[in-house]
Amino acid sequence: VAEYSRRINNYLGENQVGTQHIEDLHDLGYIPMVIKALPEGSSVPIRVPMFTMYNTLPEFFWLTNYFETLVSAVIWMPCTSATIAKQYRKILDKYAFESSSNLEFVDWQGHDFSMRGMAGIEAGLLSASGHLLCFSGTDTIPAISLLEKYYKADSDKELIGGSVSATEHSVMCMGTIEDEIGTFRRLICEVYPKGIVSIVSDTWDLWKVLTEYLPQLKADVITREGKVVIRPDSGNPVDIICGNPKSINENEKKGVIELLWETFGGTTNNKGFKELDPHIGAIYGDSITITRATEICEKLKEKGFASTNVVLGIGSYTYQYNTRDTFGFAMKATYGEVNGQGREIFKDPITDDGTKKSSKGLMKIEVNNGKYILIDQVNWDQEKHGELKEVFRDGELLIDQTLAEIRQRVKQQTV
């Protein structure tokens, strides 16, 4: 209380409100609020609330507004990242279904590379947790701990998230430009003699790696128990992976996947598309977007290659280029009571184009044709029904969904 009083006095001047309300909450010993929500992992249309909250004791009316900023700041990013991850999943599933024999590989095809570009560790963890609803691949290791702590996940019993052994540019540089092929050989044969290893390959000359070094190392690669993954990391990802037909350089015209095919070959699946020998693969992790992911899959398909020949490292170029306005995430008060009389409240600025017009009164959510719809201006009896369920009341968590349940809901595409 002393800390609160000092902060407010120094911030606003003399505290006219006082501290009794904070003392009373401490004495009460729990948060007198109800939070109602739709099931986590649901797809919710914009302008349909995914949760509501209200106070249960009239003297603590102030709690809802005190919580508004705190809840908004924590919730918008994981919801936004989960929504974007789901769009990636839809794209990768579509092209895998059309061109690949290994649909399960899509679990790993979208890999979270974003942590080092996020606005702090907490932002990285929240975003990565959203990504993990649709994919298993992540380099944000602490997100696994977050999901174990808050979503009843257990990495001893289930796959929460995983990655592979991988190098970075500094490792390759330390091997020197004069002996880059020696670095490749040492990594493949000595440091990681089995399993999957991802080797960043554009430190100096990607095309030399693909057309000179790898042909010399072919026997080591195809007799190795595991998979060597080549990682280009610069340039236009669509052109690098799929080839640039406008280039005067023959290697650039072909692109990474075609050059790997020329050296290592592979099989043609029953859908008529080429799949690289399982000992070799590729990952691209720089500047990937939804649009570029779609273009990569489409161009590979046009060239006769399965989309699953490449993994996409989805980084901060996707997950940091967002705000709470990306999908219109906002929280607004819509109902209040004064002396026991309800008031439907809303905002509708005359200077706005209608975007900021808010819902009015008590709300319920129903399902219509497989989609959630909002019905506002209902009464308290109507508010008790519908799809919003109490998940928290007066200090007690009533519904505690697991990561496995949420992932299954996302996978089934159900409301």
Image (cartoon, rainbow, N blue to C red):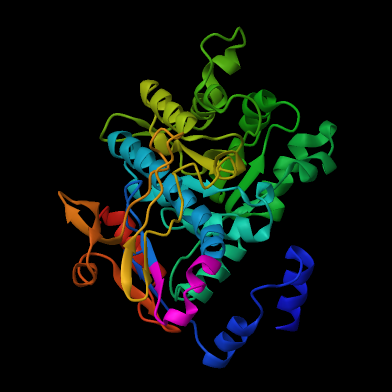
Q: Residue at x 51, y 72 (%)?
A: 62
Asked if residue 59 is among those painted magenta in the image, a careful observer would answer: yes
> How many numbered callouts?
0
Would you identify the image quadrant in which residue 11 lies? bottom right
Q: Nearer the viewer, residue 61 or 99?
A: 61
Measuring from the top left, give residue 335's x and y in whole percent: 36, 63
Q: From where the camera sits, is residue 32 visible?
A: no
Placement of 137 over or under 248, stated as above or below? below
Measuring from the top left, give residue 208's x and y in whole percent: 69, 24
Q: Is residue 141 left or right of residue 33?
A: right
Q: Nearer the viewer, residue 202 or 52?
A: 52
Q: Which residues are magenta?
A: 53-67
Q: Quadrant of the C terminus?
A: bottom left
Q: Nearer the viewer, residue 300 or 280?
A: 300
Q: Residue at x 77, y 35 (%)?
A: 180
Q: From where the camera sits, is residue 48 visible?
A: yes
Q: Is residue 182 left or right of residue 327?
A: right
Seen from this angle, which residue lies furthest front?
339
Would you identify the image quadrant in which residue 145 lies? bottom right
Measuring from the top left, give residue 269's x and y in whole percent: 31, 35
Q: Is residue 122 left or right of residue 333?
A: right
Measuring from the top left, give residue 30's x and y in whole percent: 50, 87
Asked if residue 281 is among those painted magenta in the image, a careful observer would answer: no
Seen from this angle, which residue lies furthest left?
369
Q: Quadrant of the N terminus?
A: bottom right
